[in-house]
Image (spheres, rainbow, N blue to C red):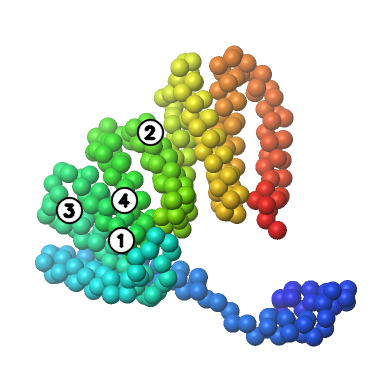
Amino acid sequence: MTDSPTPRLLAELVAQGLLPPAQAAAIGEDERTRPFSLHYELRALLYLGITLLVGGVGVLVYQHIDSIGHSVIIGAITVAMGVSFAYAARHRPAFTWGEAPRTSIAADYLLLLSCLLFLVLEGYLQVQYGVFGNRYGLVTVLPAGLFFYLAYRFDHRGVLSMAITALAAWVGVSVAPLALFTTGFPTRELSGAGLGLGLVLLAAGLVSERLRRKPHFGYTYMLLGSNVALLAAMVRLFDGGSGTEPSALGRALLVALLVLGVCTVLVWYARRTQSYVFLLLAVGYGYVAFTSALVILGELVGVSSAFFELAVLYFPLSLIGLAWLLINIKKVLRLT
């Protein structure tokens, strides 16, 4: 506690007559004897341990697949998955549309482990035996549906993130199946699908909070949805094949305006939830979209050269504005 500023602050308050010495001594004693929480550090280590365990299982299977045998590998993964899920199911909380109380931290992580092992088992069966054939959409939509159910039944935001990721994979496979291996990366198709999915996730987050149906899931929906939607919009905005024709510029301007609209929603959500993350997302993407909209407008009205002359002032002044915003971010969020 030698580096703590608490004793100095308490001494200043006592010297100014704002705090009685006895109360200052009690506060100082509480600060010196208060236990230090390792909650988040231990949770991070547990997540890391589960990830390393699943990765190690994959490496072990790859290196010894010929000597171990397929049936033994499948049986071991199935047993580990079943035991993990059985423990999690035994300690699952009673279902509620609110936030369920935690009954067992170990059950939370074993549920996560069982979901990861399910993906390992599904991938192994598909690669080795072709269980799903060429129906690659089924490979992704099956875990998505299962993980959504488990996330709501067990009130687990980590599994919800996995469900959203699987859903995004299903959307990608459905829009452009095998395109990555045949015709190259389908930028426009995937960006359009990603934009739509992101907007749906944003709406799901707002609706879940509005209707009080797992409202604490709203943060996960909003965070993943905003990133997916804004990244997809950026890809479509800067797609090299969009062209410089008025119609193409008009579509690009609509995308830029859509980004600004999403950023406005994020600013509103950040102020309502007192979240730095959403405000930073809105500022970063909004700055790029606003600048792009100015360039596109210049192209449409034929004064792009004048804009580039003004860019000498625009970029320094705008960056100064961004710096001011970051410095005064607490005032923007109405924090005390």
* Lateral position of residue 131 relative to residue 51, left or right: left
- Residue count near mark 2 (Cα–Cα under 10 Å), binned few <14, some 14–19, many ≥20: some
- Earlier sequence position, callout 2 versus callout 4: 4
- Earlier sequence position, callout 1 versus callout 2: 1
Q: Nearer the viewer, mark 1 or mark 3?
A: 1
Residue to which mark 4 is pinned:
166
Whether tag 4 and tag 3 are in contact, CB under 8 A, the answer is: no
Q: Which amino acid type is shown beneath numbered disc 1?
A: Leu
Residue to which mark 1 is pinned:
150
Residue to which mark 2 is pinned:
192
Q: Nearer the viewer, mark 2 or mark 3?
A: 2
Q: Quadrant of the image for the N terminus?
A: bottom right
| Residue 127 badge | 3
Q: How far apart are marks 2 and 4 (CA)?
A: 18 Å
**Which residue lies most toward the top here?**
302
Using the rendered view, name the quadrant where residue 98 is placed.
bottom left
* Lateral position of residue 315 relative to residue 163, left or right: right
Q: Which amino acid type is shown beneath numbered disc 3?
A: Val
* Place of residue 295 in the rendered image (x, y in percent of width and height, measured from the top left): 58, 24
At x 47%, y 74%, the residue is: 42
The residue nearer to you, when weighing 213 against 273, is 213
Whether tag 4 and tag 1 are in contact, CB under 8 A, the answer is: no
Q: Which amino acid type is shown beneath numbered disc 2?
A: Gly
- Which SS class for mark 3? helix
- Which SS class for mark 2? helix
| Residue 278 badge | none
Say if 176 sits above or below 87 in the image.
above
